[in-house]
Amino acid sequence: MLSQVHEHIVRELGESSRTDTIFVLTAIVFNLIVLAVNSGLASEAVTRGGSATYDTVLVVFIVMTVLLNVVALVALILGRRTRRMLLDGLVAMYRDNEVAKYYDPSLMSNYGIRYQLFAAVIGMLALTAIVVPLIIRFTG
């Protein structure tokens, strides 16, 4: 039974990692696409002397950028919490079976730092996808 619990926790960790990867990649790709689209829209609005249509689409993409990135960051926070709970269970199991010495506890903090770095990358890209087109639009 113990090996089945161990296998289940390890499977859940793998699934959690895949889910986190999907959210991170989705946010990054979306931010890069929005950066390109909004920069093009802003540039076109400047070239044509301003247009309510371009500005409206720009605003819609900015709102969607904020919403998508909030969802991605919340998903990462939940993924981090889930990983922590699963790893705590594994470590407890290892301790009970006197094999905990093979699991370095610093891995737990490294995972936490990794999630913070993912969140920072997503946040910086989101900010870039919002600010750069606004700079082009209003200073171009």
Image (cartoon, helix red, strand yellow):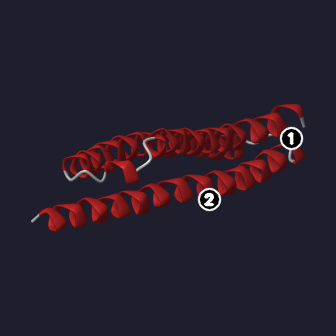
Which residue lies under the disc numbered 1? 49
Q: Answer with the quarter of the image where residue 33 lies.
A: bottom right
Which one is in front, 104 or 89? 104
Return the x and y of residue 78 as percentages of the image width and height: 35, 42
Which one is in front, 140 or 31? 31
Q: Is residue 36 left or right of residue 83?
A: right
Q: Is residue 40 above or below residue 45?
A: below
> For the point 18% across and 67% down, which residue is it?
3
> For the point 89% across and 47% down, which residue is it?
47
Q: Answer with the quarter of the image where residue 4 lies.
A: bottom left
Q: Which amino acid, mark 2?
A: Val
Which one is in front, 102 or 72? 102
Secondary structure of residue under mark 2: helix
Q: Is residue 66 above or below residue 87?
A: above
Tell me, yes or no, whether the two marked residues, 1 and 2, touch with CB atoms within 8 Å: no
Q: Is residue 34 left or right of residue 1?
A: right
Q: Give the mark nearest the N terminus, 1 or 2.
A: 2
| Rendered-image quadrant of the N terminus | bottom left
> For the point 40% across and 43% down, which residue is it?
80
Between the C-alphas of marks 1 and 2, the distance is: 30 Å
